[in-house]
Amino acid sequence: MKNMQSKSLNWLKSLQLGALAILVAIIASGCASRPKEIVEVKPDMSTGTVTTELFTLLKSVTNEASIGETVVYNYSILAKAKLKDVTLTDRVPAGSQLISSTPSASPQGDMLVWNLGTMMPGESKNVSLSVKATQPGTLASCAYVTAIPLACTETVIGQAKIAITKTGPSTAKVGQAVDFNVVINNPGNFVAKNVVVTDMIPDGLTHTQGSKLTFTVGELAPGASKSFVVPTVATKRGTHKNTAEVTTSNAGKANSDATVVVVKPALSITKTGTPEQLIGKQADYTVVAKNEGDTTLKNVKVTDTVPAPMRLLKAEGAQVSGNVATWTIASLGKGESKSFALTVGNTEAGSYTNSASVAESEDGLSATASATTLWKGLPALLTELVDSVDPILVGDSTTYTITVTNQGSAPDANVNVRVMFPEQLKPTSANGVTTGKIESNVVTFAPVAVLASKQVVQWTIKAEALKTGDVRPKVEVTSKQIKTPVTQEESTQIY
């Protein structure tokens, strides 16, 4: 029995030494043909470990098993460098039958090969092989790893990028400050160089430094940003686009714009009314307030002040205080207008102007308008005819005085006086404010151009008595205002 055990041990040692010699030959052959390292796992009973500068390989298996039982081999490979084409190779030991492997191996003759690909330093990969023992004896096999070590370097190639955004108010009023914000940033991973921002100020906006602004930034680090404020003033109504551009020497260029609509609030007022009216009657006026601008106006006030001697009689919808009427408009939209009416009276002749105003406090808007009415009175002519001597003898003379008084409130014009005598009287002379003309028994005076209110004018006619009787000279007065003659008679007795 002892001799048999000794022979078995000698045989196993010979087998192990033979396998080791074959593996060393394979390693030597591989090193001569390609840059791979082949390492044999020495049979160390149930565990075999080999360590190189490139990797560590550990193979383990159960110590004992009986015929028909499954024997499982576990392999663990730990990379110490970056490896390419990592391959694990082993064989199914004699006296066993392949059951499975994880991952699946690629059979190459009587060998099993696992292609594990590329491994990074510190990375580990595990493989398992299951076989079934089919006969008594010792299951012996050696695994080896081949790999191509990689010497790798990295150079980071950066790319600078540039971006720009410009923002500002969407609307503004003429005369209002309009501030734009310009922000540039580098979203790349390299420094942007020779960065310059140019801002073009459009017509309708002004800047204290002109219409072209330049900001030199220089370098802009990756992820960094820089902002600028561009203060302008709106000077003209309309839509104005403000464009900013950023240029670089290594990141190209970009631009961005912001548009502002510049509006102008404006307010107007008109007033119309009765151009002429007789005193004692009423005159009507219409006041119109209109939004001439681009914005809605709030709390607009319309005020009408009626000057003396006129009197405010009616102003519908207004707050009235004495001769002042005030209307308040809560909101007046773009292009919208509001009308207001008022009625006044007057008892004095003359030309009088009635003014109205409109105002809006938020934008400081105001406007005025006026309408003038000529208030006219009516002339009223009083005509008198008086003789100086009555009765008179035939052959004697008497003088007739004609007096015309404008008792009205307005002047009259083109006042004409005509006196007709009966045959018993003969006019011999005619005098007065205008020259007289005697034709037979009719005396006509040149017209009075203007007879003012309360003015009195006179004429005299001397007449000689020719026959007895109760005679009645008659005067007729006409004027521009009086188309139907006003007549007056005077009775004179001739004996």
Image (cartoon, rainbow, N blue to C red):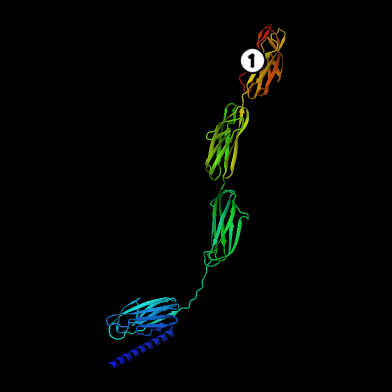
Quadrant position of residue 198: bottom right
Q: Is residue 446 visible?
A: no
Residue under label 1: 488
Quadrant containing the N terminus is bottom left
**Residue 65 % position (x, y):** 29, 82
In the displayed structure, does residue 287 sit left or right of residue 100?
right
Q: Nearer the viewer, residue 297 or 288?
A: 297
Q: Is residue 228 visible?
A: yes
Amino acid type of the residue tagged 1 in the rendering: Gln
Q: Is residue 109 above or below residue 295?
A: below
Q: Is residue 481 above or below residue 250?
A: above
Q: Nearer the viewer, residue 367 or 124?
A: 124
Mark 1: secondary structure: strand
Quadrant containing the C terminus is top right
**Residue 117 % position (x, y):** 41, 76
In the displayed structure, does residue 378 sit left or right of residue 55?
right
Quadrant position of residue 199: bottom right
Quadrant position of residue 443: top right
Q: Is residue 338 above or below residue 347?
A: below
**Residue 173 % position (x, y):** 57, 48
